[in-house]
Amino acid sequence: MAVAACVMAFGAQAALFDDDGARRAILDLRQKVDISQQRTTEELKKVNDDNAQLRRSLLELSNQIELLRGEVANLRGQTEQLTRGITDVQRTQKDLTQGVDERLRKVEPLKVTVDGKEFAVEPAEKQEFETALATLRKGEFAAAQTSFTAFMKRNPQSGYKSSSLFWLANAQYALRDYKSAVINFRALVTADPEHLRAPEALLSMANCLVELKDAKGARKALEDLVKEYPASEAASVAKERLAKMK
């Protein structure tokens, strides 16, 4: 009986011990769970805080990028404006340079080569001579005579003088003013015997003298041509004419 009571008492104590251990285990487990939940909550909060900070950083970065884009666009606009400005300045400088060059060309002496002679002339002088010559070539002989006469009066020392005498005499020949033509052809040969047109001038002078019925003068002009310019084409023509005149 006593033994049974002891056994029963021991069993009650064992059951009580088991209940306490279980409670402690449950409490420990709860405590661990609570700690774990707390840690998880803290970690989640930290993650959320980190995410929020990251979002703020990304937003700030996005804003900075937009600002930079705006600045780049503004700089691009300024660069384009500056480029246009530079282009305009360069164009203006080019126009000014061309304008200056054109004005200088109008006043600076020019080098020209006419009938094998090179010399310097004023731009206006060159223009005047070429206009007179163009008038002659159009068959406007009276106007050409007037132009060449006026040209030589205005430019008595011109390098164009010998050529002007030659073309003036040709205009007069075409107008049948043979006496004036002879005077100017002779003036060319006398003043500038080395001129490229001198042989032609003598031949043309002989033609004028023939028209004036001056056979002796014509023969003399042809003989002078053959003597002074034997290698010229005009001299070959002169020889043929002299042969026919004998």
Image: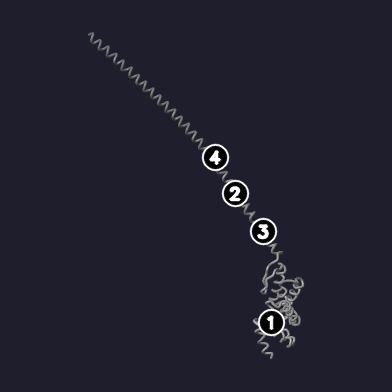
- What whole-number distance in Å separates the C-alpha atoms at marks 2 and 1? 75 Å
Q: Looking at the image, which residue is at 63% across and 55% down? A: 90
Which class describes the residues within 10 Å of circle 1: few (<14), some (14-19), or many (20+)?
some
**Residue occupied by mark 2:** 79
2 vs 3, front mark: 3
Looking at the image, which is closer to me, 55 or 120?
A: 120
Secondary structure of the residue carrying tag 4 is: helix
**Which amino acid type is marked by label 3?**
Thr
Residue at the right extreme, as displayed: 153
- Write down the quadrant of residue 34 in the picture: top left
- What whole-number distance in Å separates the C-alpha atoms at marks 2 and 3? 26 Å
Q: Of the residues under marks 2 and 4, which one precedes in the sequence?
A: 4
Whether tag 3 and tag 4 are in contact, CB under 8 A, the answer is no
Q: Of the residues under marks 1 and 4, which one precedes in the sequence?
A: 4
**Residue occupied by mark 4:** 64
2 vs 4, front mark: 2
Q: Of the residues under marks 2 and 1, which one precedes in the sequence?
A: 2
**Residue occupied by mark 1:** 228
Secondary structure of the residue carrying tag 3 is: helix
- What whole-number distance in Å separates the C-alpha atoms at marks 3 and 4? 48 Å
Whether tag 2 and tag 1 are in contact, CB under 8 A, the answer is no
Q: Looking at the image, which residue is at 72% across and 82% down? A: 205
**Which amino acid type is marked by label 4?**
Gln
3 vs 1, front mark: 1
- What whole-number distance in Å separates the C-alpha atoms at marks 2 and 4? 22 Å
Residue at the front extreme, as displayed: 227
Secondary structure of the residue carrying tag 1 is: helix
- What whole-number distance in Å separates the C-alpha atoms at marks 1 and 4? 96 Å
- Residue 22, position in %: x, y? 33, 19
- Write down the quadrant of residue 109 in the picture: bottom right
